[in-house]
Image (cartoon, grey):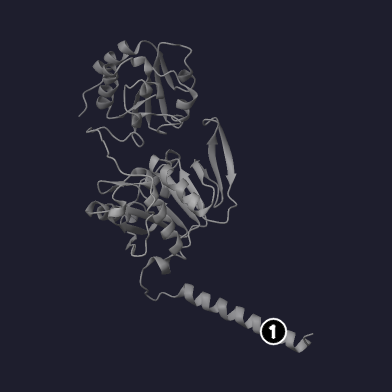
Amino acid sequence: PKSEGETNEKRMTTSAFLLRALTKKKQFVASNAPRSISITNLSRYISTLILAEHESGSIKPQTVSTVVAANSLGESSSISLLLAGSGSSLQEAASQAASCHPSVSEVLVADSDKFEYPLAEPWAKLVDFVRQQGDYSHILASSSSFGKNILPRVAALLDVSPITDVVKILGSNQFIRPIYAGNALCTVRYTGGGPCILTIRTTSFPVTPITSDSESKKAAISQIDLSNFKEDSASRSRYVGQSTQDTERPDLGSARVVITGGRALKSVENFKMIEKLAEKLGGAVGATRAAVDAGYVPNDLQVGQTGKIVAPELYMAFGVSGAIQHLAGIKDSKVIVAVNKDADAPIFQVADYGLVGDLFEVIPELMEKLPEKK
């Protein structure tokens, strides 16, 4: 048995050790001495990692909305954006990302031919690679096809459960997400041991205008050293190609005006009426699942629970009955206008303005009344 003197001496030694540790920590935090910037020595300050989407040298709006969502996490001391790709367009996107929002403290860039195409396997490995060099409490991406393709794989690598389609953040570990096709909201508490992985429904986190003072703030840009990065040789995905429509219409997910057509348009030729109206209003074109399944438009224009979630200032629906899955994707729209021959169509229950009429008569008359687009 230890004597009382030995016990007191041990207590004094422990107390002195804690006092010295706290003093050193205080001195470290208060120190303003310059230090080199790298992932290793900044990782302890970065708690939120966001997977950034970019195209043609520009950051996509949904990434900025994800940054807005990350600000609600509370315990996050800083936010880091992760960009991957190759070539000059990647560096242009990184430069824009550095000033896209004042909350962004660092932009991490993975420049390699391995990330020339946004395939899920190399991206998931990259996120895990960056995570191993940092201490991230949260990993976020938008609830787009990009985020939904990558983050579940990241969650599998880390053996944690992802939380998808978050519409509200109540704290660092408590979130609200829709269930039952958007007819109910569920509060989810994360109690896992690893990083909390979230996909964000970006229409629920609008971006406020940035002040001129905030615009001058620019985050640091760090190039990730990929010399030790090992890509999975057993990748099951391969890049086939990408088809894009040559149009001046805005992106469906972020457009202020969305014009949607349903199966009642009856043909590809008739659906061009929707496209012409959208062009005149400067809006994006959407479609119901029934219209997509009928082959009137490609599936990237589908609006609804299994398509794009939209929240425009104006949503116009022509020949749309209002299936529950479709209504789940438009419920956050500011103003909903519906035109349908069926007075009992469910779309009228959520519409701010409704017109019972034949769309083949209404659209031509509306086109005549509208002024020409400047």
Q: Residue at x 52, y 30 (%)?
A: 181
Instruction: Say what amino acid the circle numbered 1 marks.
Output: Lys
Residue situated in front as seen by the camera: 231 or 141? 231
Q: Is residue 318 above or below residue 141?
A: above
Image quadrant occupied by the N terminus: bottom right
Residue for badge 1: 10
Q: Percent from the top left, x then y, of residue 94?
A: 30, 55
Q: Percent from the top left, x then y, of residue 3?
A: 78, 88
Q: Residue at x 37, y 67 (%)?
A: 38
Residue situated in front as seen by the camera: 131 or 72? 131
In this rendering, the count of numbered labels is 1
Q: Percent from the top left, x then y, of residue 106?
A: 37, 60
Residue situated in front as seen by the camera: 291 or 52? 291
Left or right position of 156 against 107? right
* Residue 103 visible somewhere in the drawing: no
* Residue 258 visible somewhere in the drawing: yes
